[in-house]
Image (cartoon, coloured by chain):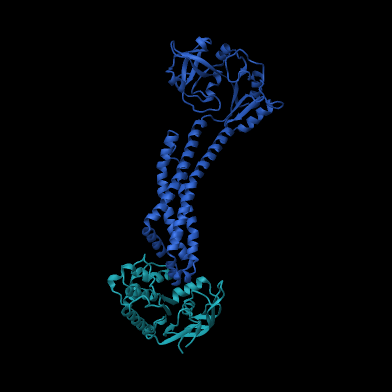
Chain colours: A cyan, B blue
Amino acid sequence: MRERVIQFEDVVKIYPLKSGDVTALNHISFSVERGEFISIMGPSGSGKSTLLTLMGCLDKPTSGDIFIGGRPTRDMTDIELTSLRRDRIGFIFQYFNLFPLLNIIENVCFPRMIKTGQGVDPERAKKVLQAVRLDESLYTHTPLELSGGQQQRVAVARSLINDPDILLCDEPTGNLDSKTGASIMELMTDLNREGATIIVVTHDPNVAKYTNRTIRIVDGCIAS
Amino acid sequence: MIFWEIAKRNIRLHFLRSTLAMLGIVIGVVAIASMGILGNSMVASVSESLNSVGDSVIVSPYSGSGGGMGPGGGGGPSGSTQDQYISDSNYQKIKQAVAPNIAIPVHQTSQRMSVGVNSDDIVATIYGVDPQYIKDFNMVLTAGDYSNGNSGCLVGSEFATDNDIRVGSRISIGNDGEYGTLRVTGIIEERGMSFDISTDNALVVTQDWYESNFGKIDQYDQVVVKVKEGQDTAKVKTVIENQLNRRDKIVTVTDSKATLSSIYETFGTITTFVTAIGGISMIVAGVSIFNIMMMSVNERIKEIGIMRSIGTQKKEVMSMFIYEAAIIGVCGSLIGGILSLFAGYAVSALMLGTTEYLWTLSTALSVAEGVGFGIIICLACGVYPAWQAANLNPIDALRHE
């Protein structure tokens, strides 16, 4: 059996609101093994985003346990959770979310710089940028000078710079045209073949087609 | 460090906004430092005038009760203490009590006088001092010599300049020279303000001449005690008071050192007050810094969310905003520090009429104080926005549009 990089055990997430508590996730249990390529699908308000924030250690469950790389996150401090995100998880967002003040190399190196406390490592940045097939002439540009597809490639490169165990993607093609979206998903597939564990949250069945397994969420529960 | 770089670039991106905030700090530093420079220059200026006084204790008749301390001296010249004086017996008591310090009896009056034949009448102070004590007043002569004869006198530099008096000039005292004529034997160098005798606009005559012409024999207007080095002026003052004021208060005893320190204290308070007024502009600048830092945080909520989600620690987010405040603070304060030298120069020149006290350690301290206060205000005003940025919920920040 392969190593479990993520494990949810009877996880419940309730948001206390003035109008009454909202249960976003209701006793969810599942695991993700190393090297898997998973899509999480479901209608709006089903709990996909909550699931992603819990997997990304951005939030803690109301009850139940979450293990990342075998380590329980329940009693981790904010500093430990932040370090876990930095060292073991790569994030790819729908709107790319690059830093407009930094150039491409600096954007890619950002997680590396906060991990090592050192400056830009252009060699390492070039290596991951070549892996996401971004034209070398764009490396010194700022994000706003790039197309959406190019920005998303930079975002993928940034998520890979610290060799994370898991790549968490939130609608990675949601802001791209279908052709560019397809090229990004092909890039993801290649990364998965090379060993990356990827979890994609999406509405789009065309995106889900690229993955090996789909988890469907309905009303905070795993439907299939 | 990447957060330092981001802070720098953000300031560059919002150059105008940052410059305006910096301008506030520049104004604040200039206000504080230049007020400090002015205050210190004032103290230095007064110190220089008063330091020449040395350690002395002045004994003058007590005027509080309205009565004299000895027999009245009616019919004499119009002295400042016409009906009040220190008798010779009391002078002798003072002399014995303060020994080995020197007690100098001094006569003083204001008189009409004229210089030369056809000049207008002028009014000046005349001091009568025993020649043996003249040198104890540390008077330096710019021309001539100390008076040898009975009808010789010394005149102050300002009096000499204003009335075109030289050594050898003759001055008729009183209306139509009713008290006789004096020959100028020496001109006293400018002494500035003094606790004992203010000679700049006065004549110093011999005690004998004074008493023979004004008739106030053995009735002194003040006694100046020159306290020797190593002796305590406060103790001398107490000794005199114990000697003469035991039953009734008959003399007022002034300790020059205590008066000096009281003057310095007053100037210190004035300096603090005007610096505090300058400080108000610094507080206004601080509010401006706080405002732009809050704007900066609000504009970058999403960016903070991204940073936090990809593993940036709270303290790193905080440092980024603190760096931003520090850059504005340090640059603004340093520019303000340099400009405050010019402002201090201008203010000193305008208000004191001199800039000779500008290049002193106290000026450097005032500038350092202004610069330091500017930086501290900026950092203090950057702390809360930075703390708020660092403690944003990463999920809410990521969803922020």
Instruction: Give the x, y percent position of residue B62.
Output: 64, 24
The residue at the point 40 percent across, 45 percent down is B339
The answer to whether B245 is drawn above or below residue B375 in the figure is above
Residue B73 quadrant: top right
Q: Report the side of B386 relative to B265 (left or right).
A: left
Viewer-proximal residue, B374 or A213?
A213
The answer to whether B196 is drawn above or below residue B76 in the figure is below
The answer to whether B174 is drawn above or below residue B397 in the figure is above
Q: Residue furthest right?
A: B247
The answer to whether B156 is drawn above or below residue B339 in the figure is above
Q: Residue furthest front?
A: A19
Total labels drawn: 0
Q: Report the side of B320 relative to B125 (left or right).
A: left
Viewer-proximal residue, A153 or B316?
A153
Instruction: Give the x, y percent position of residue A187.
Output: 34, 81
Instruction: Give the x, y percent position of residue B203.
Output: 50, 19
Instruction: Give the x, y percent position of residue B383.
Output: 49, 59
